[in-house]
Image (cartoon, rainbow, N blue to C red):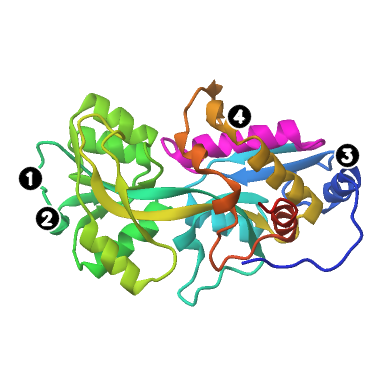
């Protein structure tokens, strides 16, 4: 869905950055002339959001003259939406289902820069676990991800549709993987890219299994049409784990509506012009470039980037996609 901008004269990039410097909130000090400081909300430790968010921030800072993007760790999707609406950040990552309300609308004041990649819902247990199917979660200790995360959002939906009553815990991806490894929980949900660092590391330390979620995917499609699609976590994702049926959810990069259109145009151009570089030199916000750290970035392309469902594109992003029709 595209939200068309009002007709207006085309400004130079420098003029837009100068204007943006006086408009954007959340900066520790007033930017110097020509300098724009942006904050991008990412996710928790062990999550793909941290890696891809760090890489996006670095490349926008490198490619958009005068712009510096700082990453903000978060609990992920719902937390990022809250920070965006409060003006604490200017850009943020979120899963599409956490963004769209039951009436199909996105929150006021926010729009999409683009669709990035799809996350897959993982239900992970240790290989020797007595849990063989979704229904076996009843009464078990299960992590639903961090509070305000996309994992929590979809996990609560899935358990509610079951219905299955579990002994739920709220742990980040890294915390969930460590707790599962140490026997402190029996299973963990994770809505994330494939493969995801926390689960990859867990599989290297302890043999794991993924529980199929075919029926749960069908229930989600019926109850919440729009943001969900059937998917398979491939056998190549985690050592010794066969291909597993599940559900996928698109992830989008959001922007506040009050960001200048030409600035968002430049950000969109950076994302789609430098996809290969973003992929081959992904960065965790707390560390250096990591070669091939985020294979999900290979999903970023112009054809799917515009597909943000009922979430309108920011006028600057809409203009970029119009200028680059293929």
| Residue 82: image location, x then y, percent | 56, 59
- Contact between marks 1 and 2 (CB within 8 A): the answer is yes
Q: Can you tell which of label 4 and label 1 is closer to the viewer?
A: 4
Label 3 sits on a secondary structure element that is loop
Q: Which residue is mark 1?
A: 130
Tag 2 residue: 136
- Disc 3 to disc 1, how far (Cα)? 60 Å
Dot 3 corresponds to which residue?
Answer: 34
**Highlighted range, magenta:** 42-67
Residue at point 29%, 33% (across, down):
236
- First in sequence, mark 3 or 1: give its number: 3
Q: Secondary structure at mark 1?
A: loop
First of labels 4, 2 by sequence position:
2
Q: Position of residue 185 (x, y in %)?
A: 20, 43
Q: Is residue 314 above or below residue 66?
A: below
* 10 Å crowding of disc 3: few (<14), some (14-19), many (20+): some
Q: Marks 3 and 2, Cα distance to the nearest angstrom?
A: 58 Å
Q: Secondary structure at mark 4?
A: helix
Q: Secondary structure at mark 2?
A: helix
Side (left or right) of 292 relative to 278: left
Residue placed under numbered mark 4 in the picture? 277
- Left/right placement of residue 177 relative to residue 85 reads left
Which residue is painted at 30% across and 48% down in the image?
Answer: 232
């Amino acid at each position: 869905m595209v939200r068309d901008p009002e007709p207006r004269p085309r400004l130079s990039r420098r003029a837009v950055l100068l204007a943006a410097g006086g408009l954007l909130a959340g900066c520790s000090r007033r930017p110097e002339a020509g300098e724009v400081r942006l904050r991008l909300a990412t996710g928790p430790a062990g999550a793909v959001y941290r890696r891809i968010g760090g890489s996006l921030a670095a490349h926008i800072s490198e490619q958009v003259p005068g712009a510096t993007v700082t990453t903000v760790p978060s609990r992920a999707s719902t937390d990022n939406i809250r920070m965006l609406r409060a003006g604490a950040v200017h850009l943020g990552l979120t899963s599409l289902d956490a963004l769209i309300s039951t009436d199909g609308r996105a929150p006021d004041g926010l729009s999409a820069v683009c669709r990035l990649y799809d996350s897959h819902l993982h239900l992970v247990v240790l290989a020797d676990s007595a849990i063989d199917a979704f229904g076996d979660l009843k009464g078990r200790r299960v992590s639903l991800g961090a509070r305000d995360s996309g994992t929590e959002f979809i996990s609560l939906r899935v358990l509610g549709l079951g219905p299955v009553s579990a002994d739920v815990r709220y742990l980040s991806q890294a915390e969930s993987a460590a707790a599962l490894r140490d026997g402190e929980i029996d299973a963990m949900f994770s809505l994330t890219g494939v493969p995801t660092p926390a689960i990859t590391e867990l599989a290297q330390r302890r043999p794991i299994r993924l529980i199929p979620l075919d029926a749960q995917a069908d229930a989600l499609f019926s109850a919440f049409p729009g943001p969900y699609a059937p998917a398979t976590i491939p056998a190549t994702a985690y050592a010794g784990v066969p291909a597993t049926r599940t559900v996928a959810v698109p992830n989008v990069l959001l922007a506040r509506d009050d960001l200048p259109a030409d600035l968002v145009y430049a950000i969109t151009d950076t994302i789609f012009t430098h996809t290969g570089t973003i992929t081959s030199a992904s960065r965790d916000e707390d560390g250096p470039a990591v070669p091939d750290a985020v294979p999900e970035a290979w999903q970023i392309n112009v054809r799917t980037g515009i597909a943000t469902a009922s979430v309108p594109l920011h006028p600057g992003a809409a203009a970029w996609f119009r200028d680059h029709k293929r």
